[in-house]
Image (cartoon, grey):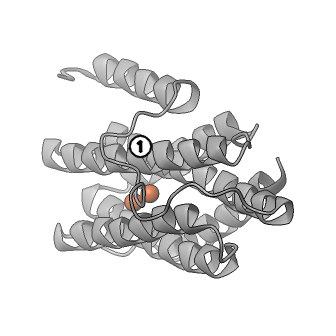
Amino acid sequence: MESGPLDSVIAAADRALRAVFAPAQATRAFPGSDTAPHQPLAEAERRESAALMRVNHAGELAAQALYHGQALMARSQATRAMLLSAARSESDHLAWCELRLKELAARPSLLNPLWYAGSFAIGAAAGLMGDRRSLGFIAETERQVEGHLDDHLARLPASDARSRAILETMRAEEIAHGATATAAGGRSPPAPLPALMRHTARVMTRTSYWL
Ligand SMILES: [Fe+2]
Ligand SMILES: [Fe+2]
């Protein structure tokens, strides 16, 4: 239970360290674990899938960081609870991406601490705009993530059914996160913010494809 500002900051630091450095724990089964058996891919496909899943892993970490930053600044308990619950759902996504990266014999982005820190700062700034704007920011984030996942679903090697199952489940849940935030009274963030988010996401996705 977080009672005062110091407790909130300590809890936020704890969440940050766990997200970045501890192995992600999924609370739900790996999507496609029964429908998409693990099959070895050709080397070129394995590399492409690994690069895309590294980007998605970094993106899920960034999504958690945004929510953690927003939760730290949330004015109402209800908003904070909703943000932390969305962040937990992102940590399943993170765990699934992490598992898939291992199966593909690949590592996560070396710059993950940087992606977390930058996204946390953006989330905290969004949180300072007030709860309704902060909820609107979630809706905008999830809209952008949905577009990004559509792009990855088109690029993923056709033979990689396991990664596809993960991305499809994530896509459906990101849409639900956005809808929940809008239904809770989210208001669109001011104009420069969606553009800044798009720009930041582009830097992150291009870099973590390689690094
Ligand atoms: Fe997610
Ligand atoms: Fe989400």
| Location of residue 148 with respect to 52 vertically, above or below | below
Tell me the residue at 35%/37% (across/down): 72
Image quadrant where one finds the N terminus: top left
Tell me the residue at 69%/77% (across/down): 155
Identify the residue position indicated by label 1 in the image.
91
Q: Nearer the viewer, residue 179 or 121?
A: 179
Q: Tag 1, which secondary structure?
A: helix
In the image, residue 141 lies at what x, y percent? 46, 66
In the image, residue 5 lies at what x, y percent? 30, 23
Quarter-wise, where is residue 56 in the image? bottom right
Q: Nearer the viewer, residue 199 or 64?
A: 64
Q: Nearer the viewer, residue 77 or 108?
A: 108
| Location of residue 50 with respect to 124 vertically, above or below | below
Look at the image and tell me whether residue 70 can be seen: no
Tell me the residue at 30%/55% (across/down): 130
Outermost residue to the left: 78
In the image, residue 169 lies at what x, y percent? 39, 66
Look at the image and tell me whether residue 143 can be seen: yes
